[in-house]
Image (spheres, coloured by chain):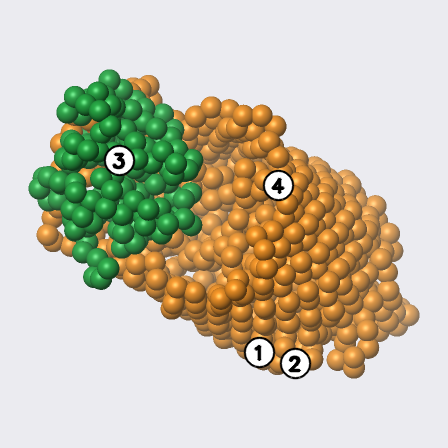
Chain colours: A orange, B green
Amino acid sequence: MKTCKFYFYLFLFSLWLLSIMRPTFATIENQDRRDIINQLKGLTLKELIKVKTFNPEAGLASRKVQKLTDTAAALFVLTQEDIRRAGITNLAEALRMVPGIQVARMNTNQWAISARGLTEHQASKLLVMIDGRTIYSPLYSDVRWDVQDLIIEDVERIEAIRGPGASLWGANAVNGIINIITKSAKNTQGNLVTTTLGKGEERAIVELRHGGQLGKDKYYRVYGKFYDHDSFSDVLEQEQQNDWQMKRGGFHIDWEISNQDAFIFQGDVYDGFIKERHLESRFQSVNSETTLRGFNLLARWQRHLTDGDMILQTYYDTAQRNRYNYDYFRGIYDIDFQHSKQFSEQHEFIWGLGFRYIHDDIENKANTIFTPDKRQDHLFSAFVQSEFMLLQESPLSKRKIGDLRLTLGSKFEHNNYTGFEIQPTARLLWRLSEIHSFWGAISRAVRTPSRAEEDIRLTIGSPETVIVIQGNPDLQSETLLAYELGYRFNLTNQFLFDMSLFYNDYNKLRTLEMVQFKPFPPPMTIVNNLNNNMSGEVYGLELSTHWQARKNWKLIATYNYLNSQLHRSPNSSDDSAESLEGSSPHNQANLRSLLSLPHQIELDTALYYVDNLSSQNVSHYTRFDVRLGWQPTKNVDISFGVRNLLDKQHLEFNAASRSGTISEISRAFYLQMKYRF
Amino acid sequence: MFFKNKFCFIMMILFLLLFKSGVSYAALPIAQEYQVKAVFLYQFANFVRWPNLAFATSHASFNICILGKDPFREELDITIENEKVEGHLVQVQRLSDMVNIDICQILFISQSEEKYLIDILAYLQQRPVLTVSDIDNFVIQGGMIQFFKRGKRIRFSIDPKTVKEADLYISGNLLRIARIIRRPYR
């Protein structure tokens, strides 16, 4: 670690040296756009088609806007159309459509969601962001899906990247990144009322949205939403007490100050509850209600430069969760700056700085104790990324060699848990032609310990036995070295095929080690400590195809294969750690058909297959969804749908160890009406 | 541990080497996408000949129109400032509907109009207006010139027959660098 630190300083020093050696940097910056245009006008047509362009549209959500075929990563995009026509009323459920993402619903309000395996009930290696705000929770380093929601129609797209993105996003973007991007306020003008009534899953959802204009180039929208979810049943068809109800509201303001500057201000607030069942002792579970509350505010300023972009973003996000065993409050303050710059025709450079401050306050109750009960953490980070055109095809040349692009970058960060972390990546993209492109990448990523992993003391007891689970302040980061290969075939826009292969090499995965065993005096006491005593490999294949078969008929098929091999070290006593292997399905497939019929009728079907989870006692299941949509007038949308048409209910993940109950996912019906005016 | 440090080290060295070598200035400028497209749009005027009836009077201006949401911002205005095409002063007109479409010599159809494209092109059929767009499959659907990106460069495709049917004459120099598309059937 020490030597890496040395390289880090060396690297910073060299960057500085390079920058003073080339005073030419500044002169390009000042070049007026008028000069550029005059220069362009002086070129012949033959020269003009050789001029390289860049697109000043950069988004913080993806650091950089890139076309799918230009991305050297396993990217899959869900559009608003995909989401709407799949009858999605919940963000977590939308991710089922992405190949290589494992979505297993545990009960009404909890999901085990992971990318490229290692799925568990608090899956820790997936980074999720909504409009550039990370929603990854520092307490258990998972995503609390029960408090993530939006007006589903306001989602513009969801970009899902499998594989590490840590070189841009930092620790915890290990197995994948999900960017949920909402529409601009300009695109959500007017009023919208949506009501959804359902049986089986959602009971009632009401969404209200109003969009308007505040002045020239200044638009806003405000929304309110009510969400009420039914309980599920267990295998004996006995209803489980896990209702879920949320109220939320928010606003979004877009202001185009000038041609160069844009400003965004947005925020949300929510309040609700979930009914949970929890283990009071090893054999007994009781019902309880958890209240959830929180808000966030985000501001972003973006400036287009003639040869790049600058973005400054800051947000504050709070969440409060009052459970039977603890009351948890946390606030996250985050500020992020990034600057992209086209140095030359061949070289684009992006760098950025970030700071995050997390403060929390936990009131310990019952059997869960966090020490200390208040904690403040600081996270400093910086990243650099360079993109080089190594080979470039001349537009008029007869020989087709394509373009070869190399991306090198790294994140450097310092956190209070493990100190310095360095997370580099190298990516190569070869665009052989407009039709074929290949890419490959090697990256390192880490998952830093969560607050609970360091500070928790959980006691589960009966009069005879007491089991204690203890955090470990010396816990290290889980590390990943990932190797990826990909191929894309893009025949016009009618047919797109995408393949990716990966080999993930993990080290220092988390285990639970027995450190103390005291049979006498009764009760028998077993103390377990968290540790990093496991390594493993996960490898797999992901395929996806988009095919516009007819003008009115689109087919999307995805498949992925995954295999995990975990090895705990010889001195580990955690004999259940390796069972994580069997918590992710080996095979998953999805086939969607979007068919538009005359008279504004849409008939959409989706078939999902998920293989069995050997260590979860979950057998494979096939889910079939149908949706019928009708737009009688321009202002009104009506849709009716059934999820899980083929079976009454099925199990997706075994959460018994956590709550003592098992919920099965039932068949659900819904009727949705949308009215725009 | 050893591997990790070596890995870091190699990454840094690679990075630095490439950082240095990558910065060689080419003679051609780098520009924003719509700066290049704006210059192309203006250049098309010099490589296409319109019939005289395309102008209301001999003093009428040469109009480059943008239909729908303007992606050029000021770039196009800067490009055509004080420029003339065969004696006609070049002007930019921003249109939100088709009412005054007949004043246009060049019509750029913004991506915002994709939904109505078929109707727009049907209306313009055989009128002496050079239609240009960056909508996908624009030429296939009956447009004249379509911008597309090849890597980071802007290129364009032309269907010469569509242009000819509108009574426009297109220079060989322009056709030579274009990707020629011939619509199979109409």
Q: Which mark is residue A622?
A: 1
Residue B178 or A138: which is nearer the viewer?
Answer: B178
Question: Is residue B151 left or right of A366 when viewed as pictured?
Answer: left
Nearer to us of marks 3 and 4 is 3
> What is the secondary structure assignment of the residue under circle 3?
strand
CB contact under 8 Å: marks 2 and 1: yes
Q: In which chain is the residue bearing label 3?
A: B
Q: Which mark is residue A190?
A: 4
> What is the secondary structure assignment of the residue under circle 1?
strand
Residue A77 or A416: which is nearer the viewer?
Answer: A77
**Distance (Cα) linking label 2 and label 4:** 40 Å
Tag 3 residue: B106
Tell me residue A542's x, y (percent). Answer: 43, 67
Q: Measuring 70% from the left and 47% from the top, which residue is drawn there? A: A208
CB contact under 8 Å: marks 2 and 4: no
**Distance (Cα) linking label 3 and label 1:** 55 Å
All told, the count of numbered labels is 4
Tell me residue A155's x, y (percent). Answer: 57, 49
**Distance (Cα) linking label 2 and label 1:** 8 Å
Nearer to us of marks 2 and 3 is 3
Nearer to us of marks 4 and 1 is 4
Nearer to us of marks 2 and 4 is 4
**Distance (Cα) linking label 3 and label 4:** 34 Å
Q: Is residue B106 visible?
A: yes
Tell me the crowding category of disc 4: few under 14, some 14 to 19, or many 20 or more residues within 10 angstroms, Cα based.
some
Q: Measuring 24% from the left and 23% from the top, which residue is drawn there? A: B60
Marks 2 and 3 on same chain = no
* Picture quadrant of residue A86: bottom right
Tag 2 residue: A647
